[in-house]
Image (cartoon, grey):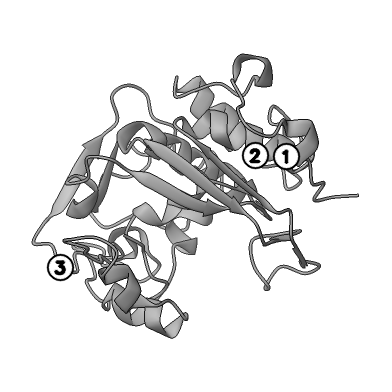
Amino acid sequence: MESSWATAGPLEDVMLDSGWNVRSLLAAAPGVEFENTNALCKRKQYARFKFPGTAYMYPEYVLNQAYEETDVFVSLAKLKQHADCGVTLSIKNCFGCVPASIYGDDAGIDEPNENPKQGRLAVVHQAKRQPSKIAPPELHPGTSNTAGVRVSRVVADLTVVRPIHLAIIDGVESMAGGEGPWIRGVRPVAPGVLIAGMNPVCTDAVSTAVMGFNPRAGKGEAPFYRNADNTLMLAEAHGVGTTDLKRIEVRGVPIEKALFRFVG
């Protein structure tokens, strides 16, 4: 599953355009399916994920039904920084779970736009509008229009309503300085590590430490430069896991030996 950028077309087509060997993936196991979760796509209705307590952003998230049908959810992410949210790891990787048909810039006001062509800047990043009426509005409108705060809150909420059972973070080859080439100053890096864990907060905390950062850092501290909330700490406050490295069992190569500083 993936929310393909600015399209509700078949995920297979997007993957082929990106250089993936779709035929090999289809042959890897019986019953392999591909689902673009940017809209309804192959499903007939959306699934509702009500937050069991006090959420940061939305009291309920409306997602593609494929996320409801998932028994074991794996977040396969890159080991890299993010200009707004500090780091892009297994938790931030799930931002795309919220469909652009509902939370996108060109989402319908009264109903979802099942052919979205834009991202989620106006709704989630910038607080310029609310999602389609199929989903509830945010809990605290007007309190923040900072992307690093808003996006971090959404993905922290998602770790509760759509739990990650296995976090796999690819740090074999990546980039430092931001999440993509549109960020000024990014550069390719090759840490040569692969990190996996069964708790996304713990796994992301170890990954952040491997990048040379403090996983418990606050706003304005590296890597949370743009006054961003620490997503890991937000998810920890939800009771998902811990960012305290002393409480996390690390097997294989110790953090000190896997260390690859993304800054300095």
Residue 103: image tag? none
Residue 207: image tag? 2
- Amino acid tagged 3: Lys
Foreground pick, 131 / 51: 51
Please state, as top left, top right, bottom left or bottom right, where the N terminus lies in the image: bottom left
The disc, 3 or 2, on the residue closer to the chain's N-terminal end is: 3
Local SS, label 3: loop
Residue 181 higher or lower than 194, as above or below: below
- Amino acid tagged 1: Val
Residue 115 higher or lower than 159, as above or below: below
Pointer 2: residues within 10 angstroms few (<14), some, or many (20+)? many
Pointer 1: residues within 10 angstroms few (<14), some, or many (20+)? many
- Amino acid tagged 2: Ser
**Residue closest to the far top:** 247
Residue 42: image tag? 3
Residue 105 locus on image (x, y percent): 40, 67
**Residue at 72%, 30% in the rendered image:** 254
